[in-house]
Amino acid sequence: MTRVCERLEKANYERVGGRFKVASVTFDFPAVFTGRKERGSDLVVVVDTDDKEAIGERGVRTRQRLEALTMALDVANWRVVVTAILVGPPIPSETVDEMTRSCRVLTVSKATLDGADGAPPLDDRLRVLLPLDARLGEDALVADPLGQLERQMEGTPDARLAEQLLAASLRGEDEVRRVLARAIEAATAPGLASA
């Protein structure tokens, strides 16, 4: 569970403890996080499924606590997205399915945490909560479909027409139709004049 909490903190979530009040109801979870900045509407509850007393038989107590939390948030008119991260041994899928009716549920098994450093499998499990890393690596290719098409058309009999159509495509569908119509007229006009 520690690794999950550390990963959330690294992703700019703020740990607010485990015990808190909503609409005069006190809730106690192993760890609770709120999002910052663009993730400000996120409330993340981390649950240790190894603690059989806390989760109850078949995870029912945790399901009930999560349902009560989401109802209290509704009553208090808090507009947050609640995510429960279940860390540890799996609980029955029926219980997890019931939990998904009141909040988003992510599961992180012990096998996910075991491994080199646990980061890639753990990140995969928490992906919906993590910021998107859209940086391009050194070996990443930047797509240039128009340039690729122009290079393929070079030296072909229709290269000039292709160039005109590509230029027209930047101005919209109607312009492409006009350029194509002019090209067809030009190609068929000499044949009509000699007939």
Image (spheres, helix red, strand yellow):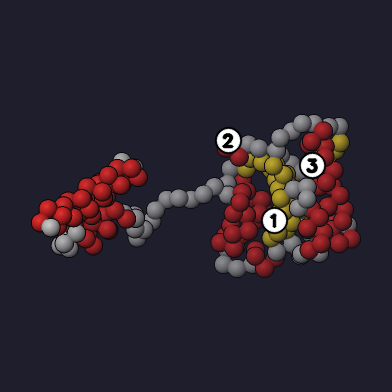
Q: Which residue is mark 2?
A: 37
Image coordinates of residue 59 in percent, x first then y, are 84, 58
Gap between marks 2 and 1 measured at Cα? 22 Å
Q: Is residue 9 above or below residue 150?
A: above
Q: Residues within 10 Å of mark 3 (few under 14, many from 20)?
A: some
Label 3 or label 1, whichever comes before in sequence order: 3
**In the image: residue 137, left or right of residue 126:** left
What's the residue at 85%, 38% (across, down)? 26
Q: Which residue is mark 3?
A: 70
The three-letter amino acid code for the residue at tag 1 is Leu
Q: Residues within 10 Å of mark 1 (few under 14, many from 20)?
A: some
What's the residue at 54%, 47% (across, down)? 131
Image marks 3 and 2: residues in contact by CB distance under 8 Å: no
For this orientation, the residue located farthest to the left is: 194
Gap between marks 3 and 1 measured at Cα? 16 Å
Q: Quadrant of the N terminus?
A: bottom right
Q: Secondary structure at mark 2?
A: helix
Image marks 3 and 1: residues in contact by CB distance under 8 Å: no
Inspect this view and state whether residue 168 appears.
no
Which of the labelled discs sits on residue 106, or is there none? Answer: 1
Image coordinates of residue 181 in percent, x first then y, are 26, 48
